[in-house]
Image (cartoon, rainbow, N blue to C red):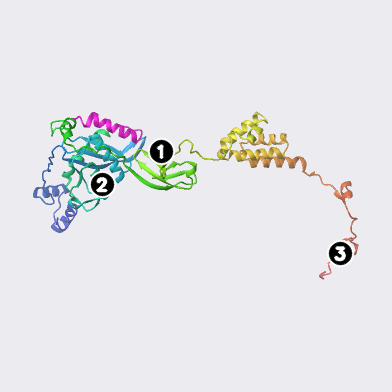
């Protein structure tokens, strides 16, 4: 039944009463199977890889969710461990690709003062372009990186976790010791505290299986490391970007400013671990600190690269003229600025236009009435002015009057009254004879 149910003991437990008439607790079934070796893999002792000084180093990454700046974010922890001394170098990245792999390993080799003859890795596509284990093919870019420092990558076989155990085991220690109870302001602070933790804690603790600390064992391993080249070039990658109409180039979702002469042209972007440099041929246009976006900023503008063009003055002339009408008007403008926000300049010009079209006393009365009722739509003030003007100047008398007998009507009449007698309209109403007229 275990084979028929594909090793699922829950299904075996559900089918036992129906097939065999046996009803037992699930824990009894699992104990029965353990005692008889049903579905139990045979335990084998873990293999121990012993390497000499300078013979092997191991590299791997592990994801963590870390609170940085009050927000929980995902970071990749890259680690390099020397096989003999177990000295470790770690750094955290927002993402980890081939470029960041070269950046990290270069930094780690410089921190160690050399390299081992081989570097054990998993079968990640960051280094391996195809194949696994002994059939793995290192990408041409990483082969050039190997030649620079004089070592070889070696991918372990699939499922052979023991082969990379020296770099896998410290990840648990990093999570349970370094990340526990610590807070970080930004990525720079995270990596700064990680380096301090390595020097003060991880590299000085005594390893029971080795009987010494990594720092003590590194003294014996250091002379066996492959020496670094006389010149270690900075790791960088090149991009081609267009400068947009606002004077910025876009790289990985971030914006970097360029000088005015580069507007609308294509520039070369040289990206390193810390900087972003804009080049036009051999001329350096700008040099920016690289943005990560962790602090919420996604734009870098250098001095002199600000938006060109005529900016509106901080105080408009219309505002000065209106404030000169008195404190009540000044108080209304202060409230209008808060309410209208970016539309304040438009409202200001509209108010000034109303002042130019109407008497000052009428304008101030309308503003006072709008302020009393909390009205900050300038069009409402215009409606109040027009209503007041209509009431004062154009309101017709309410009493019935005979306008035809008035002197003004007779004076304005251009022709005498029409004679309508021939149409029979001067007589009274006539009886309807039933015929249509």
Tell me the mark number nearer the camera, choosing from 3 and 1.
1
The reply to whether discs 3 and 1 touch (Cβ–Cβ < 8 Å) is no
Quarter of the picture containing the C terminus is: bottom right
The quadrant in which residue 191 appears is top left
**Rendered residue at 88%/64% (across/down):** 423
Can residue 99 be seen from the camera position used here? Answer: yes
Q: CA distance from mark 2 to mark 1?
A: 28 Å
- Residue furthest to the left in view is 36
Q: Which mark is residue 288?
A: 1
| Label 2 packing within 10 angstroms: few (<14), some (14-19), many (20+) | few
Highlighted magenta segment, given as a residue range: 182-206
| Label 3 packing within 10 angstroms: few (<14), some (14-19), many (20+) | few
Q: How many numbered marks have been drawn onto this rendered protein structure?
A: 3
User: Would you say the magenta stretch is mainly helix, strand or loop?
Assistant: helix
The quadrant in which residue 222 appears is top left
Q: Which residue is mark 3?
A: 430
């Amino acid at each position: 039944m275990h084979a028929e149910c594909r090793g699922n003991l829950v299904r075996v437990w559900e089918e036992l009463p129906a097939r065999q008439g046996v009803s037992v607790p699930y824990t009894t079934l699992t104990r029965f199977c353990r005692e008889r070796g049903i579905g139990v893999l045979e335990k084998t002792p873990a293999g121990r890889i012993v390497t000499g000084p300078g013979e092997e180093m191991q590299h791997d990454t592990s994801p963590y969710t870390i609170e940085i700046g009050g927000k929980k974010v995902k970071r990749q922890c890259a680690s390099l461990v020397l096989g003999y001394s177990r000295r470790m170098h770690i750094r955290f990245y927002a993402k980890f690709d081939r470029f960041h792999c070269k950046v990290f390993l270069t930094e780690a080799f410089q921190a160690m003062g050399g390299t081992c003859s081989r570097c054990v890795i998993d079968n990640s596509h960051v280094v391996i372009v195809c194949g696994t284990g002994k059939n793995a093919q290192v990408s041409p870019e990483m082969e050039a990186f190997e030649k620079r420092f004089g070592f070889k990558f070696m991918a372990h076989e699939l499922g052979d976790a023991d082969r990379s155990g020296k770099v896998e085991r410290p990840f648990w220690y990093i999570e349970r010791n370094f990340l526990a109870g610590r807070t970080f302001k930004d990525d720079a602070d995270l990596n700064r505290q990680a380096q301090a933790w390595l020097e003060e804690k991880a590299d000085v603790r005594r390893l029971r299986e080795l009987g010494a600390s990594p720092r003590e064992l590194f003294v014996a391993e250091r002379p066996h490391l492959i020496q670094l080249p006389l010149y270690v070039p900075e790791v960088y990658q090149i991009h081609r970007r267009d400068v947009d109409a606002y004077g910025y180039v876009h790289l990985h979702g971030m914006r970097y400013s360029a000088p005015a002469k580069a507007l609308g042209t294509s520039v070369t972007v040289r990206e390193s671990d810390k900087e972003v440099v804009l080049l036009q041929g051999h001329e350096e246009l700008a040099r920016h600190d690289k943005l990560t976006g962790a602090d919420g900023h996604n734009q870098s503008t250098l001095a002199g690269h600000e938006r060109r063009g005529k900016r509106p003055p901080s105080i408009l002339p219309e505002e000065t003229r209106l404030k000169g009408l008195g404190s009540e008007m000044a108080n209304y403008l202060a409230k209008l600025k808060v309410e209208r926000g970016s539309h304040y300049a438009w409202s200001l010009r509209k108010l000034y236009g109303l002042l130019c079209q109407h008497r000052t006393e009428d304008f101030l009365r309308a503003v006072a009435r709008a302020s009393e009722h909390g009205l900050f739509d300038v069009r409402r003030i215009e409606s109040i002015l027009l209503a007041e003007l209509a009431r004062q100047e154009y309101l017709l008398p309410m009493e019935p009057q005979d306008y035809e007998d008035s002197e003004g009507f007779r004076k304005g009449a251009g022709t005498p009254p029409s004679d309508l007698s021939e149409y029979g309209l001067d007589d009274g109403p006539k009886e309807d004879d039933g015929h249509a007229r």
